[in-house]
Image (cartoon, helix red, strand yellow):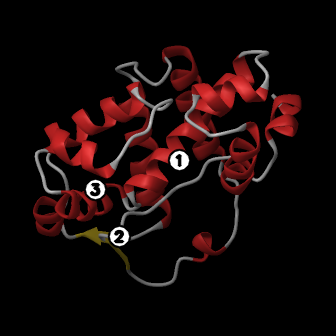
Amino acid sequence: MLHIYLPNQVSIKGPSPVLAHPFRDPMLISLGNAAAMALRESNGLGSYVAPLLESITRFFDERYIQFSIDHDRLKQDGLSGYARSSVMKFISDNLNKEVTVETLAKIAALSPSHFHRAFSASFGTSPRQFLIDRRVDRAAMLIRNSHKNFDIIATECGFSSASHLGVQFQKRLGVTPGLYRKMA
């Protein structure tokens, strides 16, 4: 399943029925499968991952949505490219540890309140929700590619327990970790 999240800076022009319900598009499926394979093969670090994700975005934008992005607002409110990549790397390297907004703000050289606003403008979600999403992504990868028990996976991904992992996993992916492992 491919989820597409639109940033707050997107203003949709006209009705877009595709946003109201799940749908299938063969081209999006092909691009999504290619991106999923690239992510799996490179653990999310390959140089070809970003271009594939950009292709998915561009295709979706051109095919389904006519929108405009307020680029001035993005520059004003969002994180700089360097801050964004530094924060992303820190989060990726520290998923199994406590990650605070204060720590991320220091990395971005911003106050915690300004960082929270800039992060939300850049990613369309709060730092806390983003961190949980990345932890669930990592857990899904470990569930797919290992036979580790869920307690170990939860610890490696920064969840307090297998139960906490299960709640967040089901909330985001719609299935339990056990069912996800069976489907993989």
x%, y% of residue 149? Answer: 79, 22
Q: Nearer the viewer, residue 155 or 129?
A: 155
Q: Report the amino acid beneath label 1.
A: Ile
Q: Report the amino acid beneath label 3.
A: Phe
Q: Specify the quadrant that holds the C terminus.
A: top right
Instruction: State the CA–CA distance, disc 3 to disc 2.
Output: 12 Å
Numbered mark located on residue 179 in the image = none
Instruction: State the CA–CA distance, disc 3 to disc 1.
Output: 15 Å
Q: Quadrant of residue 155?
A: top right
For the point 21% across and 64% down, the residue is 113
* Lower sequence index among marks 1 and 2: 2
x%, y% of residue 48? Answer: 39, 23
Dot 2, crowdedness within 10 Å: few (<14), some or many (≥20)?
Answer: some
Residue annotated with mark 3: 119
* Lower sequence index among marks 3 and 2: 2
In the displayed structure, 54 sits above or below 184; it is below
Residue annotated with mark 2: 8
x%, y% of residue 43? Answer: 50, 19
Residue annotated with mark 1: 132
Which is in the foreground here, disc 3 or disc 2?
Answer: 3
* Residue 156 left/right relative to 64: right
Q: Identify the element where label 2 is drawn.
A: loop
